[in-house]
Image: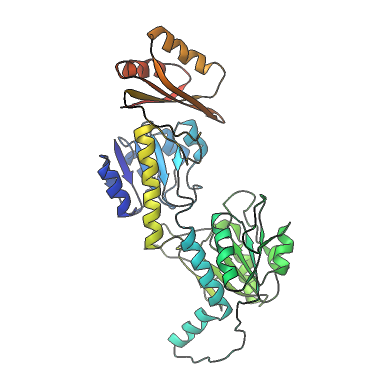
């Protein structure tokens, strides 16, 4: 079993996978579509971070690929729909860097309110600006959180300990933590918030969700923080709002277009503006977070490759069954059409196979079948059900 890891994945991942007996190749950079199509030949597993784009062309050109791991929260860089139709589960790490992002956001709330970043830049250039003008405590101010998921809710709890009043808006009903309060619509949240922080996924619904109209609805002198996805804020409109002094400060960690590597030049209309903090997509980039992400995705790989467990996959039926020591396990991904299980059971009957355990789960267009059978029958059974026209991928686990 060969695993390709791109984008400088944490050494803890390498340690775990090598200890499990897998063969690894490591690259520090992302690869282009054409490079991936060539490089993936002969590999069964791929691990990436946020810059590698897994397109339909990549997936269809690599029929041996069994699974993909995104060593980050988001999976929008992967064509997950094509992946599941190809029988390829996609795993990510939705929890491991939440604390790192939350701490960065809190740091930026205080830093913007005190103009720390701007004053530091002036002092570095020899300009002494000792003044309390436009410098505020955060205690007693209102924080509006857009997206009350793993990160947003953790920020909520930490922000209350600083004395902030917390309100949040989410399209899905969420249980408030602490003294936070839910707001029924985005407009109302923007109007009452001194600080607004974004924690939403990249979807058609969230694209430019903060634009000219929404910025105008924010309080004059308020602050905006985006550590979610670069496409959710209209950067041109934001630059104008800062120049007009309607928005007092901004911290942006993600951008609509980001350099492919550290050697490529970076440009944004927000450069050179007062009290604007620009960071290179580092929200989850702490040693602790990267190690935790490495462990989480590596463990998902091991569970899937060695026992067929898909728990945590973003595009697959979630199945996790204990292995039976006297059996071999057959895992079969097939088209989710009527009569599939009947056809497989015909094979079972014709071969006289004893099934010790069987579990079937479906997800949209695919079905995922796990069967534990006598060891002597496993290989032939795999070969026979692989021939069925509905089968996409079939493996035997020893």
Which residue ends up furthest to the top in the rendered image?
350
Q: Residue at x 50, y 58 (%)?
A: 257
Q: Quadrant of residue 64?
A: top left
Residue 388 visible? The answer is yes
Asked if residue 2 is positioned above or below residue 374 in the image, the reply reads: below
Quarter that holds the N terminus = top left
Expressed as whole percent of the image width and height from the top left, the position of residue 376 reads 29, 16
Residue 253 visible? The answer is no
- Asked if residue 215 lies left or right of residue 357, the reply is right
- Asked if residue 1 lies left or right of residue 384, the reply is left
Expressed as whole percent of the image width and height from the top left, the position of residue 160 reads 60, 69
Q: Residue at x 47, y 44 (%)?
A: 78
How many discs mark residues in the rendered view?
Answer: 0
- Asked if residue 376 lies left or right of residue 308, the reply is left
Expressed as whole percent of the image width and height from the top left, the position of residue 83 reads 47, 36
Front residue of this view, candidates 317 and 224: 317
Front residue of this view, candidates 242 and 354: 354
Q: Quadrant of residue 347?
A: top left
Q: Residue at x 36, y 16 (%)?
A: 381
- Asked if residue 151 lies left or right of residue 395, the reply is right
Check the image and tell me how it is coloured: rainbow
């Amino acid at each position: 079993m060969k695993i390709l890891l791109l984008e400088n994945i944490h050494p803890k991942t390498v340690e775990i996978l090598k200890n499990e007996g897998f063969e690894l190749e490591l690259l520090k950079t992302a690869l282009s579509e054409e490079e991936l199509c060539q490089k993936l030949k002969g590999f069964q597993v791929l691990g990436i971070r946020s810059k590698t784009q897994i397109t339909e062309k990549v997936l269809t050109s690599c029929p041996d690929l069994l699974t993909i791991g995104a060593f980050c929260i988001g999976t929008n860089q992967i064509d997950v729909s094509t992946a599941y139709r190809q029988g390829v589960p996609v795993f990510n790490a939705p929890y491991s860097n939440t604390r790192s992002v939350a701490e960065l956001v809190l740091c930026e709330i205080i830093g913007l309110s005190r103009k720390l970043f701007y004053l530091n830049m002036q002092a570095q250039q020899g300009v002494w600006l000792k003044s309390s003008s436009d410098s505020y405590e955060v205690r007693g101010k209102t924080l509006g959180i857009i997206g009350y998921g793993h990160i947003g809710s953790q920020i909520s709890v930490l922000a209350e300990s600083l004395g902030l009043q917390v309100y949040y808006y989410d399209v899905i009903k969420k249980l408030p933590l602490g003294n936070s309060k839910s707001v029924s619509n985005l407009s109302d949240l923007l109007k009452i918030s001194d600080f607004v922080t974004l924690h939403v996924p990249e979807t058609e619904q969230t694209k430019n969700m903060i634009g000219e109209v929404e910025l105008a609805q924010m309080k004059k002198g308020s602050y905006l923080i985006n550590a979610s996805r670069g496409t959710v804020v209209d950067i041109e409109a934001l630059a104008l709002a800062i120049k007009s002094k309607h928005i007092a400060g901004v911290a942006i960690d993600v951008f609509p277009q980001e350099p492919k590597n550290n050697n490529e030049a970076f440009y944004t209309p927000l450069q050179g503006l007062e009290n604007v903090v620009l960071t290179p997509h580092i929200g989850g980039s702490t040693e602790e977070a990267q190690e935790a992400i490495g462990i989480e995705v590596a463990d998902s790989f091991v569970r899937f490759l060695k026992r067929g467990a898909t728990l945590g996959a973003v595009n697959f039926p979630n199945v996790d069954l204990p292995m039976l020591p006297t059996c071999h396990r057959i895992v079969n991904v097939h088209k989710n059409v009527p009569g599939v299980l009947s056809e497989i059971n015909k094979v079972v009957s014709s071969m006289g196979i004893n099934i010790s355990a069987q579990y079937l789960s479906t997800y949209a267009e695919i079905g995922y079948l796990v069967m534990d059978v006598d060891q002597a029958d496993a290989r032939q059974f795999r070969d026979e059900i692989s021939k069925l026209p509905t089968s996409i991928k079939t493996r035997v686990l020893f």
